[in-house]
Image (cartoon, rainbow, N blue to C red):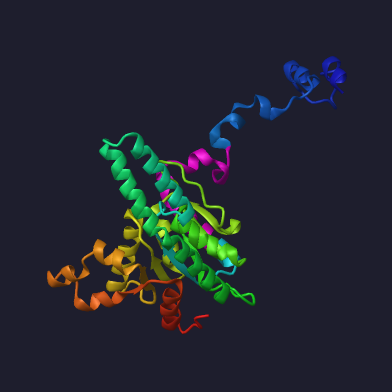
Amino acid sequence: MVLALLGRRSHPELPDISKPAIIALMIPPSDPDSINPAVESSSYIPADRDTEFLQREELRPIRIGLELLKPELIQHEEGVQSTIVVFGSAKLQESAAAKHALHMAEEEAARAPNDSTHQQQVAIARRQLALSKYYDVAREFSRLVSSTCQINGRCDYVIVTGGGPGIMEAANRGAADVGAKSIGLNITLPHEQHPNPYITPKLSFQFRYFAIRKMHFLIRAKALVAFPGGFGTLDELFETLTLLQTGKTENVMVVLVGRDFWERLINWQWLVENGLIAQHDLQLFHYAETAQEAWDLISRHNGMPSS
């Protein structure tokens, strides 16, 4: 055909076509994607596959929506009906680890007896050892709740934590002890944080936005149990108390574990005496010392069996 076109252009049955075009027909075609600049451009990537595009500032509303929707869909698929949120310090360890940390701090202090920093570290390690009992309480609480509420195919009162170490680890660990599901809501931080190994893998999430993470803590929550902790624990505690105080949420029971710690940390009555909160606002939370006490409060409030 090509030879006919080259030699017989005047034939009435052949098309009137230029010689360069005919020569082009003689060149074997190569992979068009490898030479086509249009295909190489990032603009050619479908929007839902363009991760660089999705990171643009203007796409924040889309990212927020996706971050809300993904954990919601997965929890629904996993049958999670309700949750109990457990907060507490990431720094509190189980007793054996806390004892070892104290021993190491004392050895450091002995090598530099005049160094006040080392003495301070010893004092902190002693207090951390005293607080380490709450690791065991958190673990036992999670074990108790999970063994009571995740039976016969039910998936109620699932423990949810911030996914990190310390009290969070203890709570996820308690659920794992009895073969139950638990949730971890990690968040990207300037310092690297890994999810603890006791979270149910399919329920281990990572968030970019604190606001969406906070929503997921409370969307299914029947209770919030706060163990001794720092800024993160206080943030979630006071946010939940504010939602209860203002009527934005109603059925979340707040339990503070360790009355001595909480009453030394926060002078609730002083807030009342200064007219900053009402006396009845003190009924928004309850105290417990043991795992059983905490669960009894929650179960009675929600009409559940305590064991």
Q: Is 14 in front, or is 202?
A: 202
Q: Residue 239 occupies which quadrant of the picture?
A: bottom left
Instruction: State the extent of the magenta-drawn residues as a range.
Output: 45-72
Q: Residue 108 occupies which quadrant of the picture?
A: top left
Asked if residue 62 shows in the view, the reply is no
| Quadrant into which the N terminus falls | top right
Percent position (x, y) of residue 128? 37, 53
Taking the magenta stretch, the answer to whether it contains residue 54 is yes
Q: Main secondary structure of the magenta part?
A: helix
Q: Residue 39 occupies which quadrant of the picture?
A: top right
Q: Is residue 57 above or below residue 184?
A: above
Q: Is 239 in front, or is 136?
A: 136
- In the image, taking residue 144 as reference, residue 110 lies left or right, namely left
Q: Is residue 72 above or below residue 210?
A: below
Percent position (x, y) of residue 164? 47, 52
Percent position (x, y) of residue 169? 49, 56
> Residue drawn 46% across and 80% down?
299
- Figure label count: 0
Q: Is 267 in front, or is 277?
A: 267
Asked if residue 255 shows in the view, the reply is yes
> Residue drawn 35% across and 34% down?
111
- In the image, taking residue 95 as reference, residue 25 lies left or right, namely right
Farthest left residue?
274
Q: Is 12 in front, or is 243?
A: 243
> Residue drawn 12% across and 69% down?
274
Taking the magenta stretch, the answer to whether it contains residue 91 is no
Q: Is residue 280 above or below residue 271?
A: below
